[in-house]
Amino acid sequence: ELKVEQNPLFLSMQEGKNYTIYCNYSTTSDRLYWYRQDPGKSLESLFVLLSNGAVKQEGRLMASLDTKARLSTLHITAAVHDLSATYFCAVVKETSGSRLTFGEGTQLTVNP
Amino acid sequence: EPEVTQTPSHQVTQMGQEVILRCVPISNHLYFYWYRQILGQKVEFLVSFYNNEISEKSEIFDDQFSVERPDGSNFTLKIRSTKLEDSAMYFCASSEPSSGNTIYFGEGSWLTVV
């Protein structure tokens, strides 16, 4: 059974600071996704990472993938209040078509 | 920008009643999915659908659940006899056929079973 673990689960940070969210998964995967969810809202796609060493950046967010370590990171640079949300990573197991297995989510609060 | 649309946004139903949740996937997408999220918990896969049939389903997707693509645009999830524990946000999603494409989620249908 594929397990996806995120840490931390809760993160409170000051504006302007940097931090990293970690996503570990238990079996080989060919795709990893990061999503953002605002309270009561849908899942907004942030990144799709397809290969070992993949790095993608959008604004203050940068995601990377290490398939050997089965680890993805979401790095936040100079956080702003608008980044407050819950961030999920989700993994597709190699043999499971397109079924996403989600982590528990990291609830990020950026304080002014 | 194209989007996945879902109706209703919120439904309250009595335990034991049948519920149909509707979705209109993005028009050129061929893979369709249902996920659910119980309040405060992570998102769970229910079922994927491709080429007019179920391609994969989870252990949650038991006999009380069914999916259908009744016409060229709609994709529905039916829950035959709702239980209290079916209360959740149900998300429809769709993607293009190529591996590695973004999976787009709808706004969700919040189901409350009383």
Image: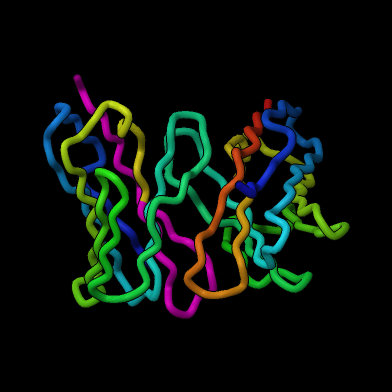
Q: Position of residue A46 (x, y in %)?
A: 40, 51
Q: Quadrant of residue A109?
A: top left
Task: Using the image as rendered, state which of residue B29 and residue A30 is in the foreground.
Answer: B29
Q: Which residues are magenta?
A: A89-112
Q: Is residue B65 or residue A39 the one in the foreground?
A: A39
- Residue nearer the viewer, B51 or A17: A17
Q: Nearer the viewer, residue A74 or B76?
A: A74
| Residue B106 figure quarter | top right
- Residue B55: horizontal and vertical position, in percent? 66, 72
- Direction top: furthest residue: A112
Residue B104 rendering spot, x and y as whole percentages: 56, 53
A64 on left or right of B58? left
Magenta span contains residue A96: yes
Task: Tell how many labels.
Answer: 0
Residue in the picture at 43% in, 45% down: B42
Write the residue at 40% across / 43% down.
Answer: A36
Above or below: residue B41 compared with residue A75: above
Q: Quadrant of the C terminus of chain B?
A: top right
> Which residue is painted at 35% across and 66% down in the image?
A49
Residue lying farthest to the right in this orientation: B71
- Can you give x and y, in whole percent of width and height, for residue A53 in the image? 23, 73
